[in-house]
Image (cartoon, coloured by chain):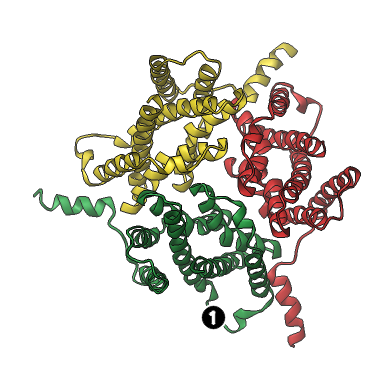
Chain colours: A red, B yellow, C green
Amino acid sequence: MTWEILNVIGTMAFGISGAIVALDEKYDLFGVYLLGFTTAFGGGLVRHVVLGLPVSEVWEQSMLFLIAFITLTLLFFIPFHWFFKEWEKWGVFFDAIGLSAFAIQGALFAVAAGYPLPAVIVGSVLTGTGGGMIRDILAGRKPLVLHKEIYAMWAVLGALVIGLGIATEMWELMVLLVLIITLRMLSVIYDWRLPSRSDWLRFVSSFRK
Amino acid sequence: MTWEILNVIGTMAFGISGAIVALDEKYDLFGVYLLGFTTAFGGGLVRHVVLGLPVSEVWEQSMLFLIAFITLTLLFFIPFHWFFKEWEKWGVFFDAIGLSAFAIQGALFAVAAGYPLPAVIVGSVLTGTGGGMIRDILAGRKPLVLHKEIYAMWAVLGALVIGLGIATEMWELMVLLVLIITLRMLSVIYDWRLPSRSDWLRFVSSFRK
Amino acid sequence: MTWEILNVIGTMAFGISGAIVALDEKYDLFGVYLLGFTTAFGGGLVRHVVLGLPVSEVWEQSMLFLIAFITLTLLFFIPFHWFFKEWEKWGVFFDAIGLSAFAIQGALFAVAAGYPLPAVIVGSVLTGTGGGMIRDILAGRKPLVLHKEIYAMWAVLGALVIGLGIATEMWELMVLLVLIITLRMLSVIYDWRLPSRSDWLRFVSSFRK
C-alpha cells in the first residue's frame, strides 16, 4: 500500500518534470511522451535491474501507465502557462517530489529484498535520481545530480533513515517524504552545498601557517 | 523463424549503420567493431534486460555474431566508396531497416511474454531505437530519435499493429516491416513532423481572438 | 579466490581513478563518492546484467564497499598533492589497472557461465571498460575507450587468452594482469594506434598507381 502511494506520487511528479523539460526544449508531442515516460518509469526500471528484482513487475502497472499517459496528454494540450508564470521553475519542484518518493521507495525495496546498508543506499540513490538523469541526458542537459546544490545526498539520508530502521510506519515515511522534499527545495533556494576539496584544503591550510 | 529473420535483418542493418558512423567519425578498426556490434546487439540486449527476459539467449546467437563480424570486416577493408557516392547517407536507410525490424521483433517478444499493451509499446520503441541511441551517444551525436522528423512514432505504430493483434501472419509482418521502413524514409525525405506544443497553442489561440 | 583478488584490485583502482576525475572536475564530497563508486562497481554491475548473472551477488560484497568507502574518504581528506606532482596523470595508470583486472574477471565470469567466445569478448570488454565509461560520461569527458591510443583491444586480448584456455592457473592470470596493464600504459606513452580506414586505403591505393 505504502509502495503504491509512493509509486503514484513519484511517477506523476517525475512524469510532469519530464514533460516540462520537453516543452522547455520545444520537443514535439512524441518528445513529451518520451521524456515524460522515461523520467517517470526510468527510476523504477533501473532500481529493478540494479537490485536484481523481477522486471516484469514494472510492466504490470497498467493503471500507472494510464495515469502517466493522461497527465502528459493534459500537460501538452492545456495552455496552463496562460495562468502560471515561470512554470519552468515548477520542474525543479516536481523533480524534488519524484526524488523523495522514489528514494524512499527504492530504499524500501532494497530492505524488503534483504540487502545490506550499502545496497539500500545505492538503491535509494539510483531509484531517486535514475529517472531524472535519463531525462537530463536525453535532453542534453547537465544532470541535476551534478549541480552544485545538494541533491542525491538527501536520497542517502532517506536510505539511512530507512536502512537503519528509524522510519518504518506509514506516517513516519510520509514525514520523511515531506522532509526530503523540503530539504531539497531549501538546497535550491539557499544554494546549500557540500564542501568541495578546495574548501577542505583551505581549512587544513589554515593550520599550516 | 520469423524472429530469426527479423533478427538477422535488424542486426546486419544496424551493424552497417554503426560502421558507417564509425567510418564517418574516422574511428580505427576497433571503433568500427565497437560501434557496429553495440548498434547491432544493443537493441536486443536492452529489450531482454528491460522486459526481464533471459539475457543468456542473446549470447547464444554465435551465427549472428559471425555474420556481424564478417559484415563489419568487409565494410572496413573494401573501398566501397570508390563505387558509391555519398555513402554516409546510406546510414539513415540502414538505420530505418534496423528500426523497423527490431521494433517488430521487440513487440513480438513482449506479446509472447504475455505483457499488456504499454509494455509492448515500450518494448518496441526501446528495441527499435536502443541500438541506434547507444551508437549516437558513443559517437557524440544527437540521437536520431530526438531529431525533428518522425522516428520512434513508427515503432509505436508497429507496436499497436502487433499488440492489437492486427498483424500475426509472417506475410503481414513482412508488409509491416516494409511499411515502417517506407514511412521512416518518407519522414526524412519530406521532413514529416509531429505537432509541437507551439503549433498546438497557435491553433488554440486562433479561437481566442 | 582469484576472482576476489581481481575484484579488490579492480575496485580500488577504478575507485581511485573515479575520485581523481571528480577532484579534477572540482566536484564536492558527494561527487567524489558518486564517481568513485560508479566507476568501481559500474563495471561489475554491467557485467552481471549483460551476462544475465544474479545481480544480488554484487550487493553481497559489503567488505568491498567498505574498502572503497575508506579509500575514497582518504583520497578526499589527505592533501596528497603536497607530495605528488601531476597526480591527475596517475588517473590513467589506475584506470589501466582497473581495465586489466576487470577485463580478466569479466572473461572468467563468462567462461564460468559456459558462454561461447563472442560473449567472453563482450563480457571482458564491457566489464573492463564499463565503469570507466560511466565515469567519463558522468563527468562529461570523452570516454577513454574512444581515445586514439589502443584501449579496449587489450581487454579483447585478455578475453582471447582466457576464452581459448591459454591462461587458467592463478600465476598465469597474474602475468596476464601485468601484461595488459603494461601494454595499455605503453599505448599511452608511445601513442600506439590501430590502423584507421584512411591508413588502410592509403595502403591499398599504393598498389593502384
Q: How many marks?
A: 1
**C37 lies above or below C171:** above
Horizontal side, residue B177 vs residue A145: left or right: left
Q: Which quarter of the figure has residue A44?
A: top right
The chain ID associated with circle 1 is: C
Give the residue displayed 21% in from the left and 50% down from the top: C201
Q: Nearer the viewer, residue C17 or C156?
A: C156
**Which residue in the rendered view is the most extreme toward the bottom?**
A209
SS for callout 1: loop
Give the residue displayed 34% in from the left and 59% down from the top: C160
Horizontal side, residue A9 vs residue C111: left or right: right
Horizontal side, residue B8 vs residue C110: left or right: left
Horizontal side, residue C150 vs residue B131: left or right: left
Q: Residues within 10 Å of mark 1 (few under 14, many from 20)?
A: few
Give the residue displayed 56% in from the left and 22% down from the top: B194
Q: Nearer the viewer, residue C177 or B126?
A: C177
Q: Nearer the viewer, residue B200 or B106?
A: B106
